[in-house]
Amino acid sequence: MQYISYKEESIMMKITGTIQQNIEAEELNNYIGKNVTLTGSVYKIRNMSGFAFVILRMKRSLVQCIHSKEYTDYNIEELKENSCIHLNGEVVEDGRSKKGYEVRIKDISVLSKPEKEMPVVINNKEITASLETILDYRPITLRNEKERAIFKIQEGICIAARKFLQEQRFTEIHSPKIVYAGAEGGANIFKLDYFGREAYLAQSPQFYKQMMVGVYDRVYEIGAVYRAEKHDTSRHLNEYTGLDFEMGYIDNFTDIMEMEARMLQRVMDHLLKNYSPEIELLKANIPNLTEIPSIRFTEAKELISKTYQREIKDMGDFEPEEERLLCECIKKSTGSEFVFVTHYPTVKRPFYAMEDPDNKEYTLSFDLLFRGVEVTTGGQRIHDYKEQIAKMEYRNMNPELFESFLMIHKYGMPPHGGLGMGLERFTMCLLNQNNVREASLFPRDQNRLVP
């Protein structure tokens, strides 16, 4: 009889015995003078006079191993780069090594060998290929130490945000991605055949976030978002990861901005504390975030026009160049690489955005700009049923099509609001990348559906 039993932290199998726990690269400095077993892929072999460097790629780090006939009988000529191996060796102190140690190889067991040569060289510091080529071969180019470091940083952003929001008593939710109606409206929505009925891919978890505020008061979600925008730019994707939160019983929409500022402070602190190898490898400039200045939309427009002698062409929204110039101006005057822009025009915001009671032409909403790019959109939502119906009718919308959404207003909702942040775009800005596709594991745009 086969069975699996669980004892403490290790998984035990009756047939095969205890699963071996191998040493991780980050622990090796604690094993100097001891023999260890390592698993990984052969990243690079550098043959020298009388010995060879074998660079082992492990989960997070590269480990320098030394092959010499003085320590082993293993024939190094049989070893191929990109082979997956078990390696037994002794950890020895070495002041010449960047990490202060190296592993003297005693034995190697090859688990698998590559069938073909790599179509792209991945074991140099940088992949010297076009972005298109890097993305075409994404399953293997991600094995490059710099390419994969990007997504360790992205992991850190999510871990820190999640921990912070949980500490603030937010409940994590998972909303449906196949929906009856689009939260943002418009044409930038993917249609699909849902058993003979027309359905859509979710542009945002917006409706469900608001619904769940009526259940938990504070909710957040990290999940896929779909936009059928025909933008072929360096900052747009058609599928991206949204980091969203929504909070009830707010006094003002600035409560949301304050919560985001505190969340981002936690993110920066967490990255600096836990991801220094990736930060160093990518030469990332993690900002020291203490507070974020804010400016009204119309004032920002006027500031850009006055400072850079630019004609204001559109008082409804920013041009990408204006976002860049505003961030440049704010950094010069305050030192901050972030800036909140508030009170966007009502005509440019969704139907659920609450209007400024002092001036109905503007909303209690905001965008967060970071290093010249908008990374967050948020604001206070309408919570009163009659007010929401009136605004929908003013926009010639049919409230009957939004019956399940309006249910929350009809049966009582607290003042609430929230935001959505594009994870890939935020990562791009944080790492000073040129294209959001660099910060997406497997990008989806107008032209790319594989890998």
Image (cartoon, helix red, strand yellow):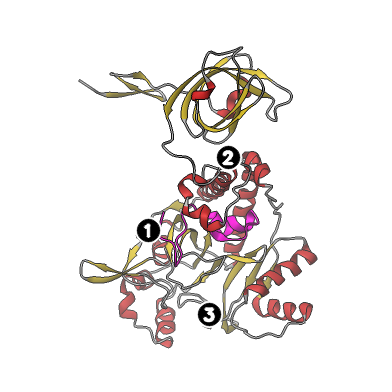
The magenta region covers 424-451
- The answer to which of 180 and 364 lies nearer the viewer is 180
Q: Which residue is mark 2?
A: 123
> Residue 281: x, y in percent?
66, 42
In the rendered image, the quadrant that contains the N terminus is top left
- Dot 3 amino acid type: Lys
Residue picked out by circle 3? 348
Q: Residue at x 34, y 60 (%)?
A: 176
Residue at 52 percent of width and 49 percent of height: 158
**Pair 3/2: label in front:** 2
**Residue 66 vertical position relative to residue 437 in the rendered view, above or below:** above
Among numbered discs 1 and 2, the one appearing first in the sequence: 2
Q: Which residue is mark 1?
A: 175
Q: Position of residue 398 (x, y in %)?
A: 34, 83
- Per the image, label 2 sits on a secondary structure element best described as loop
Q: Is residue 428 left or right of residue 248?
A: right
- Contact (Cβ within 8 Å) of mark 3 with mark 2: no
Discs 1, 2 touching: Cβ within 8 Å? no
Instruction: Name the element at disc 1.
Output: loop
Q: Earlier in the sequence, mark 1 or mark 3?
A: 1
Of marks 1 and 2, the one in the foreground:
2
- Is the magenta region chiefly helix, strand or loop? loop
Q: Secondary structure at mark 3?
A: helix
Q: Position of residue 183 (x, y in %)?
A: 41, 71
10 in relation to 184, above or below: above
- Tag shown at residue 319: none
Query: x%, y% of residue 286?
Result: 68, 50
